[in-house]
Image: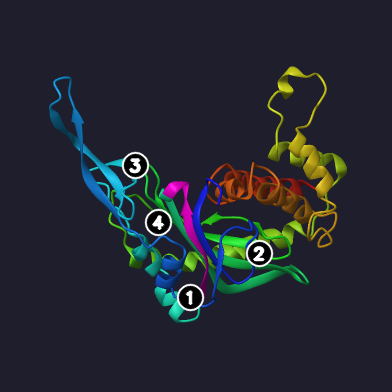
Amino acid sequence: MSHEVETMAYAGETPWHSLGTKVEPNLMPAEMCAVAGVDWDVEKKPLFYVDENNVQHHAPGKQALIRSSDNVVLDMVGDDWNPLQNRDAFEFFGDFVSSGDMEMHTAGSLMGGRRVWALAKVNDSFEVFKNDVIDQFLLFSNPHTYGMTIDVRMTPIRVVCNNTLTLSLASQSNRMVKVNHRRVFDADLVKATLGVAAEKLATYKEAATFLGSKKYKSETLMEYFDRAFPLYSNKNHKEKKYSRNAKLASEIVYTQPGAEFGAGTWWQAFNAVTYMTDHIVGRSDDTRMASSWFGSGKKLKENALTSAIEMAEAA
């Protein structure tokens, strides 16, 4: 596999990024953890340095985060940094899978083990138009690197084109689902917020239906794609110019998978941006996957949804 994706497994149909090894469906979380190649532990080990006299000293307040399977150093962390073992992260899904509310779908390791994730399909979906189905997934990200938080997010996926959008489950309450490694991970506390996932899906359904009811005009469509894929050198031009990606989005809006659903609406325009981000922009499938779920692509799609709603409201 390429450099972003280290190991990966998936159940069911081939995922949109076409990466990983197919496994039998209905695996329990511990089984998925094993076949995805992430059933290893991380350990904190003391750090030492050697001075000019070749004398070894302990580095106070710092420890190396080591992967037990091959002794790879994943990062340097503080004494108060609490690792979450992958097996424990996957067990988060145990009760939901056992009850039939979810099934394990995809899992693996990115960035040489520095980010491990698990994706479970939730038994909940809706249609924006007839046969235009949105499935719901829950994405659990367990990073083994300083500065990143454990993160649980809802991920709606449009079936016809496999476009994704990650939505934070954080609410205005004190129950957060982004967990800093300076705290010990409390699975029960995070599970208590999962009711927010249903609320988020309902909100997304409302937004998608609204976008599907509003028509765009050609001039506002290009403005929208310019917002999503700006040409940063525009300030040096007297005449408006558009980036290569903005122009490409304006071309595929009519030919993208699922373009027949809501043709001429802001739903079609928004999905042109998500299709570009998930399937076209980037060097390879694995870099697009990492970006779409965890990086700049995720933020781009979130902003694109906000912009589409704003422009649809003004239409």
Q: Earlier in the sequence, mark 4 or mark 2?
A: 4
Could you tell me the amino acid type at mark 1? Leu
**Which tag, 3 or 1, sits closer to the chain's start?**
1
Image vertical order of residue 264 relative to residue 106, above or below: above
Q: Amino acid at mark 2?
A: Lys
> Do callouts 3 and 1 mark residues in contact (Cβ within 8 Å)?
no
Query: Which region shows up in magenta?
Result: 102-112
Would you name the residue on which mark 4 appears? 176
Looking at marks 4 and 1 on the same chain, the residue that comes earlier in the sequence is marked by 1
Per the image, is 267 magenta?
no
Contact, CB < 8 Å: mark 4 with mark 2?
A: no
- Please tell me the numbered disc located at residue 75: 3
Image side of residue 206 versus residue 314, left or right:
left
Q: Position of residue 58 (x, y in %)?
A: 15, 34
Q: Kindly identify which residue carries mark 1.
A: 27
Which residue carries the number 2 mark? Answer: 205
Residue at 59% of width from left, 65% of height from top? 201
CA gap between label 4 and label 2 equals: 23 Å
